[in-house]
């Protein structure tokens, strides 16, 4: 007996229907898929590019790399692209800044694979997603690890690392360290409260910063204790 079709299983779509399904799917996801041909032109970009970056598909395909990628990230992006194309089958992951259609720079993560020698593909397939929120969180965590939350100055750890780095340099410049503290600061906290004490510290920092050079380093290493390089 010839096998009967499974009536509970949808029939596989033809090529045209597959393309429609694929296009509809990429309207709903938050990643952009695009394919570069061997001549570096863009063969395909998913409709989600309009949601993520604000460009129409046609606009995106006509953008040059320098128009899209932040100048500070461009050299590394070009170097990565050259390496990727030189190694069939290899893949990469990169984080860089891209200009949206509205002119804003956003951080994106791009994952790509060289399938130039893959039959039926002959391209470099890449996915792009907005990671601006993740990047901002990472930067906040780094700042919190190295800066005093109240004053924004370098904290003890960061100050010591900076000083040790200066002293360990091959050519050590003349370095002076100044210790600063506030007289009778404890009574301010005890009588007026910690909020008033915090304001005194912040005003003190602004006063000191107004009288030091840009290259000097001011750090808070204790309650009312500061060091200056």
Image (tube, rainbow, N blue to C red):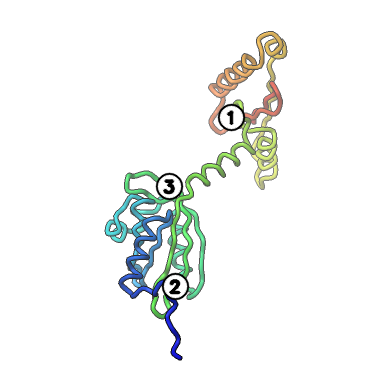
Q: Which residue is mark 3?
A: 106
* Residue displayed at 46% across by 91% down: 1
Q: Earlier in the sequence, mark 1 or mark 3?
A: 3
Q: Quadrant of the C terminus?
A: top right
- Left or right of residue 112: residue 208: right
Whether residue 42 appears in this view of the structure is: no
The image shows residue 24, relative to residue 6, as above or below, that is above
* Residue displayed at 31% across by 52% down: 55
Residue 39, percent from left and from top: 34, 71
Residue 131, percent from left and from top: 48, 49
Callout 1: 10 Å neighbours few (<14), some, many (20+)? some
Front-lying residue, 17 or 121: 17
Residue 78, percent from left and from top: 43, 61
CA distance separating discs 1 and 3: 25 Å
Q: Earlier in the sequence, mark 2 or mark 3?
A: 2
Q: Are marks 1 and 2 in contact (CB under 8 Å)?
A: no
Residue 96, percent from left and from top: 46, 53
* Residue displayed at 39% across by 72% down: 123
Q: Which mark is residue 57?
A: none
Q: Which mark is residue 152?
A: 1
CA distance separating discs 2 and 3: 43 Å
Q: Earlier in the sequence, mark 1 or mark 2?
A: 2
Callout 2: 10 Å neighbours few (<14), some, many (20+)? few
Q: Are marks 2 and 3 in contact (CB under 8 Å)?
A: no
The image shows residue 176, relative to residue 193, as above or below, that is below
Report the mark closest to the observer, 1 or 3: 3
Q: Which mark is residue 9?
A: 2
């Amino acid at each position: 007996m010839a096998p009967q079709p499974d009536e509970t299983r949808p029939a596989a779509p033809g090529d045209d229907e597959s393309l429609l399904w694929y296009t509809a799917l990429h309207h709903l996801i938050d990643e952009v898929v695009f394919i570069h041909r061997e001549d570096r032109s863009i063969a395909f970009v998913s409709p989600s590019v309009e949601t993520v970056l604000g460009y129409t598909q046609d606009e995106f395909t006509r953008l040059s790399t320098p128009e899209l990628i932040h100048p500070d990230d461009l050299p590394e992006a070009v170097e990565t692209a050259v390496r990727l194309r030189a190694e069939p089958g290899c893949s990469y992951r990169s984080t860089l800044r891209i200009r949206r259609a509205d002119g804003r720079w956003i951080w994106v993560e791009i994952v790509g694979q060289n399938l130039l020698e893959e039959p039926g593909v002959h391209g470099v397939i890449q996915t792009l997603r907005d990671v601006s929120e993740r990047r901002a969180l990472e930067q906040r965590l780094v700042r919190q690890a190295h800066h005093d939350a109240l004053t924004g100055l370098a904290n003890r750890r960061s100050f010591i690392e900076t000083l040790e780095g200066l002293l360990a340099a091959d050519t050590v410049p003349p370095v002076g360290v100044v210790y600063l503290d506030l007289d009778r600061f404890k009574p301010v906290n005890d009588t007026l409260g910690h909020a008033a004490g915090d304001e005194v510290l912040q005003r003190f920092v602004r006063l000191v910063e107004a009288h030091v050079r840009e290259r000097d380093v001011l750090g808070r290493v204790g309650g009312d204790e500061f060091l200056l390089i």
